[in-house]
Image (cartoon, helix red, strand yellow):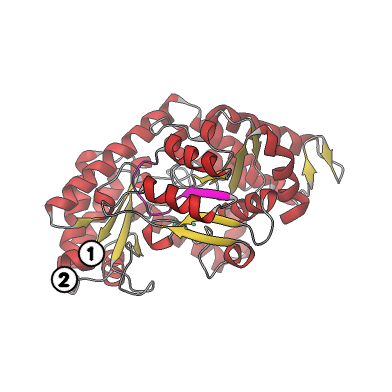
Amino acid sequence: MPILKKQDPKIYKAIQGELKRQREGMELIASENYVSEAVLEALGTVFTNKYSEGYPGRRYYGGQEFTDVVENLAIERAKKLFGAEHVNVQPLSGAPANMIAYSAVLKPGDKVLGMDLSHGGHLTHGHPVTLSAQVYDFVRYKTGADGKIDYKELEAMAIKEKPQMILAGFSAYTRQLDYKKFAAIAKKVGAITMFDIAHIAGLIAGKALPNPVPYFDIVTTTTHKTLRGPRGGMILCKEKFAKAIDKAAFPGFQGGPHMNNIAAKAVAFGEALKPSFARYAAQILKNAKVLEIELKKYGFKIMFGGTDNHMVLVDVFGSKGVTGKEAEKALDKVGITLNKNMIPDDPRSPMDPSGVRIGVPAVTTRGMKEREIVKIARWINDVVENHADEKKLKVIHKEVIALCKKFPVYGNLK
Ligand code: DSN
């Protein structure tokens, strides 16, 4: 970046610092990943200059011969990846994608069943602090006594509440959803089905998890988590909702789409269509399972009874008497990044909850496999148990950097 270095050294320095952090750090935030250098290249292009309100072939401004190419390719590739009838690649991210989808098919005040945040749902699924909860009447379902979604209870709730929509999707729930059962419950009460697959989209694209798209009316996602694309959102839906979704995205909710981002989405979807992506997705599941098994050996309580996807939710406070915040902070010191997280019905506060969420998509992108995950689990235990021992933390930090250097990322970036 020779021009930036000269023109704006402060920003250049921060970017270099972040690059070093990402190269030398063990990234275990379940929603983060490393995009390819091709995706980064597409993001930093002249498409950032272009306004293109509307859709391919019907835009409001001129000069769209190249924007149409990238948006059409992104749509075509996403359709192929997920077997979707209709795709809108314009949502700026996951939260707007969800608001767009709600507004396309619901009226203000309509009732939606969505999963409780502390049970693994997401803020935009009707948490009281969000706009979604101000506009729609969200009723929250929870996991049952065995830590999994209780379909009988969900059905009873659906019959009682008569919602217009039943929403699936999670940012911390780690078990596989029974798509058929879920859709059958919605059908019984005449509700629209929506699934926010943001966390697991890459696992679905890589065929490590079954595809929910045939079972749901609307599927929303981000493109930057397991799917390993640029930060952004996307909506997949049945043809009968296509017009409403497109209209709700533009002009309903957003203005001009970010075309550099859409170009980068197209590149990422192209990568996800390759056989190597399926191997990546399969390895994520193997790594997460090893993490679950190893952490259990160290006496950590794994929420929901275990994992079927890319992450585990751990009750560190209940297991080791260390809060989620303390664990996050101590792990940060050794270069292991993850996030504190509520556990179901957490007695502690969201800013210092009982749990931590640990995900393996980013380390799997680096090429780490079962052997490395065993080491990572050992470090997590050592750090949590010795979180106040600065000397020990320093030793572990050196070991973490050494392992990360064996699995380099962004070799061509300067
Ligand atoms: N912030 C994302 C996550 O970490 O799950 C969801 O929005």
- Pick out the residue farthest to the front: 160
Asked if the magenta segment contains residue 213, the reply would be no
* Amino acid carrying mark 1 in the image: Val
Range shown magenta: 165-177
Task: Report the amino acid beneath label 2.
Answer: Lys
Q: Give whichever of 406, 351 is nearer the camera.
A: 351
Residue 343: numbered disc:
none
Residue reaching furthest to the top:
275
Foreground label between 1 and 2 = 1
Residue 414 makes an appearance in the image:
no
Would you place residue 324 above or below residue 33 in this image? Answer: below
Specify whether 357 is left or right of 217.
left
Disc 1 packing (10 Å; few <14; some 14–19; many ≥20): many
The percent coordinates of residue 128 (x first, y second) are: 52, 69
Q: Which residue is mark 2?
A: 391
User: Magenta stretch: residue 172 in it?
Assistant: yes
Q: Position of residue 353 (x, y in %)?
A: 32, 70
In the foreground, 28 or 150: 150
Work out whether mark 1 precedes mark 2 in sequence or the reverse, and give the earlier one. Answer: 1
Quadrant in the picture for residue 397: bottom left
Q: Is residue 180 above or below residue 340?
A: above
Residue 410 in the image: state x and y as whole percent: 44, 45
Query: Which residue position holds label 1?
Result: 316
- Residue in view at x 48 percent, y 26 percent: 274
* Mark 1 element type: helix
Q: So how many labels did they put on this image?
A: 2
Q: Image point 52% across, 57% down: which residue? A: 125
Where residue 311 appears, x then y in whole percent? 33, 49
Q: Which image quadrant for residue 268?
A: top right
- Asked whether the beta carbons under mark 1 and mark 2 sit within 8 Å of each other, the answer is no
Q: Is residue 209 above or below residue 401?
A: above
